[in-house]
Each structure stands twice: as C-alpha cells, then as structure tokens.
Image (cartoon, rainbow, N blue to C red):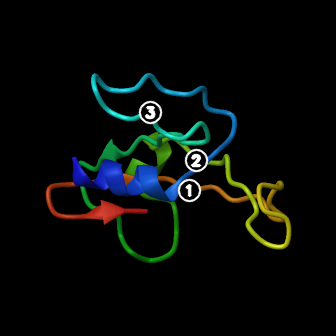
C-alpha cells in the first residue's frame, strides 16, 4: 500500500525496536517506526474538526521529536496525528 510507505518515511521515533531486515534487504534505520491507518467507511468531513466516526477508531501517533533548535529532543507542544484512508484518499 503506497500510503503506508509514505507515512513510514515521514514518521520517526526512538522508542521503536529495530525491525528485522527483509530477506536479502538492508535493515531499516534504528529510529524508524510505523504507523497504522484505519479504513474509513465514510469519508470524514474536511472541516478541521475530529468528530467523525473514523477518528474515534484511528490510533493516535504521538511519538514526535523536535528538529530545531535541538534535533531529537522532546517537542515543545504535544502533537497528535491520526490517519485514515478509503478507496480514493488518504486522510491525516
């Protein structure tokens, strides 16, 4: 699934254990982590609110790190992201 590959490239955390390399392939970086997206039965309304049914079941992604001014440090503000998809779109 292409959305999972793109999302995995965007997210990094230091708390995830290293994954086992695929047969014959290189091992992923030690800081790589994965995120799960849930399938949306109905597309969420794009209105900036999180009260659609799909957001109640999507797992929250919270393990973010600061890039500036201290790379790898804890973020200044709490951040939470949820991801969903349907046959045509990726919702973040």
Q: Nearer the viewer, residue 26 or 37?
A: 26
Residue furthest left as drawn:
87
Residue 30 point in image, percent of width and height: 59, 36
Q: Position of residue 20 (x, y in %)?
A: 44, 22
Residue contact between numbered discs 3 and 1, judged by CB atoms under 8 Å: no
Depth check: give the residue in front, 70 or 36: 70
Secondary structure under tag 1 reads loop
Give the CA distance from mark 3 to mark 1: 26 Å
Q: Residue at x 28, y 50 (%)?
A: 40
Residue 89, quarter of picture: bottom left
For residue 91, which numbered disc appears in the image?
none
Give neighbour class at mark 1: few <14, some 14-19, many 20+ (Cα, 10 Å). some
SS of the residue under disc 2: loop
Q: Which residue is mark 3?
A: 27
Q: CA distance from mark 1 to mark 2?
A: 5 Å
Image quarter where the C terminus lies is bottom left
Q: Which mark is residue 61?
A: 2
Marks 2 and 3 close (CB-CB < 8 Å): no
Residue beneath the point at 59% across and 49% down: 12
Q: Residue furthest bottom?
A: 47
Circle 3 SS class: loop
Answer with mark 2 or mark 3, whichever residue precedes in sequence.
Answer: 3
x%, y% of residue 45?
35, 70
Camera-near label (3 vs 1) is 3
Mark 2, residues whose alpha carbon is within 10 Å: few (<14), some, or many (≥20)? some
Q: Residue at x 28, y 22 (%)?
A: 23
Circle 1/circle 2 CB separation < 8 Å = yes
Badge nearest the viewer, 2 or 3: 3
Q: What residue is disc 1 on?
A: 81
Q: Nearer the viewer, residue 73 or 43?
A: 73
Q: Position of residue 66 (x, y in %)?
A: 76, 62
Q: Earlier in the sequence, mark 3 or mark 1?
A: 3
């Amino acid at each position: 699934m292409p959305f999972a590959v793109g999302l995995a490239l965007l997210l990094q955390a230091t708390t995830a254990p290293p994954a086992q390399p695929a047969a014959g392939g290189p091992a992923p970086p030690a800081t790589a982590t994965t995120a799960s997206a849930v399938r949306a039965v109905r597309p969420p309304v794009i209105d900036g609110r999180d009260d659609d049914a799909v957001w109640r079941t999507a797992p929250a992604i919270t393990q973010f790190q600061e890039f500036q001014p201290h790379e790898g440090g804890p973020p200044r503000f709490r951040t939470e992201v949820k991801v969903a998809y349907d046959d045509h779109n990726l919702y973040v």
